[in-house]
Amino acid sequence: MQPSIAQGRTMVEHIDNLKKSLDKVEALIDDKKIPLTKVSEKPVNALLETCHELLKFAETHGKSGGDGYKSLYEIALALTGATDPVVVTETVLDEAIKHLGCERGMVVEVSSEGAMAIRVARSVGQEEAIDISSTLVKAAVESGEGIIYDSSEDSASESLIQRQVTSGLLSPFEIEKDRYGVLYVDTRDPSIKLGKEQLGFLNKIAELAGTAISAAIRISRYLDEGMSGAFGTVIGGSPAMRRLCERSRRVARTGETVLLLGESGTGKEVFARAIHLESKRADGPFEAINCSAIPDDLLESELFGYAEGAFTGAKKGGKQGIFELAVDGTLFLDEIGDMPALLQAKLLRVLQEKAIRKVGGTKDIHVDVRIIAATNQDLDQRMEDGSFREDLYYRLSTFPLQLPPLRGRGNDILELTDFFLGKFAEELEVRKPTLSPKATYYFLEYPWKGNIRELENLLKRILIDHEPNVIHPKHLPEEMLDAQAAAVSDFQTLEELGHAHVLKALNLVKGNRSKAANLLEISEATLYRWINDMKKKGSWPGDEKEE
């Protein structure tokens, strides 16, 4: 998030505006106009704290003038409000490389025991990064001072000499107690000189990085703890789910309409209930209705109710609809994409006017209800073919949330498996089984088209059919084993990938072997060996056209 210096505002004006915004947010919190829950209070306060620290940095350096200070100021504003340590680290490194005119860089984390880990790297291979770390990072951390590498004067790093690095800079910074980071940048361009002035600039960026990364880590921890509140029903700590819970928690505090998007079985109702419980309406009712499960001719009366005498068989005194039942609370409209066109128009009117009219009724009834809608449909496609109203879509999608499929949640699959095995074992009064290593592999690789619902059903069937102490592949259904076998049969070897890459290069340069070798960054002799190997293996399509 770069500040718009080009839009006519000075840095001083940007700083003042940011300060006013922070003051306003804090005043709204104090006046309880921005309500904080037990879950959200810690991360919000931590975020405000880091905003003030970065603002102080921006005030100190942004008003001093000069391109270097302007860059520091821009970086400080770019980091203000960031809550993900990875995003903060990437931003710091990218800005350092850009403003110093370097080509490469990395951020290394160092523990008190001296263990090193490459957190972010740009144009630096893993093997090379380890070499650089072993020679220079330790010295920077131990001295607590920045280091300048100049190939014309310093021959201490064989790795840098081999890779023709002409100059580089390292700046250490403290992340937390007994935990350090080192910001490293370098260049192979002899015309770029990285000296004391540039090191001073990098030291300031490193100082800023320590503040921002430390704050982001604290916030991340608070969010992990916050998975216990209303979102404790959400199982899984993958990055995708943590980000989703964080966004859901933020929108829960507002009264905005939410649209949950995702495949069937991804847990949309679980999120809808959690959002309700984190909201100001938590003490009110939570009502849910599946728009695809009720016949079209009955759905209107289920939503809005009906008046006495509205139709044959109508109850005396009429009936309340689900909108009236959800007053002062939340209404969850599941499978909204299947709602018939006539009711879409009536729902749009309710959203616009906050009032309903019962079937057969003559008066409007005001309803104070928060709407959370959900669908597994592609609403863009539905709008394109005219089966879903575009104006209704934009009313519902004030705040869309995309739920990831189970296959995109990594080890969350194993957490969910452990949870359901414990739940079903207790229900069935059997011993809770574990997964064998090979079964674990199948679970992680299976596509889970039915998502959490498919996983849940599979585990219950296994416990009922087998009551195993350990789940092995023999307990898994054939379709699961067949899916894995098909994936393995389609898997290409490294040799096959190499052959395909060589053929693609030759095709791009119309068969010119010299150009293909240059494109592949190999010698022509190596290229000829690849071609001969393909001919022997029968994967050579024939003589390519020579130029």
Image (cartoon, rainbow, N blue to C red):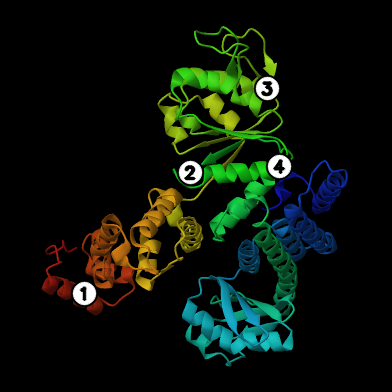
- The x, y position of residue 498, in whole percent, is 27, 70
Crowd band around label 3 with a 10 angstrom C-alpha radius: few (<14), some (14–19), many (20+): some
Please, what is the three-letter code of the amino acid marked with disc 1?
Trp
Q: Earlier in the sequence, mark 3 or mark 1?
A: 3
Please, what is the three-letter code of the amino acid marked with disc 4?
Ser
State the separation of the CA atoms marked 3 and 1.
70 Å
Crowd band around label 1 with a 10 angstrom C-alpha radius: few (<14), some (14–19), many (20+): some
Q: Residue at x 68, y 84 (%)?
A: 147
Quadrant (top left, top right, bottom left, bottom right) of the C terminus: bottom left
Label 4 sits on residue: 279
Q: Which mark is residue 262?
A: 2
Label 4 sits on a secondary structure element that is loop
State the separation of the CA atoms marked 1 and 2.
45 Å
Q: Earlier in the sequence, mark 1 or mark 4?
A: 4
Q: Which mark is residue 530?
A: 1
Q: Which of 355 and 69 lies nearest the eye of the viewer?
A: 355
Are discs 1 and 2 less than 8 Å apart at CB? no
Crowd band around label 2 with a 10 angstrom C-alpha radius: few (<14), some (14–19), many (20+): some
User: Does 235 sit left or right of 63 as displayed?
Assistant: left
Q: Which of 273 and 64 lies nearest the eye of the viewer?
A: 273
Q: Which of 400 and 190 lies nearest the eye of the viewer?
A: 400
Label 3 sits on residue: 354
State the separation of the CA atoms marked 4 and 3.
19 Å
Label 3 sits on a secondary structure element that is loop
Q: Residue at x 63, y 49 (%)?
A: 247
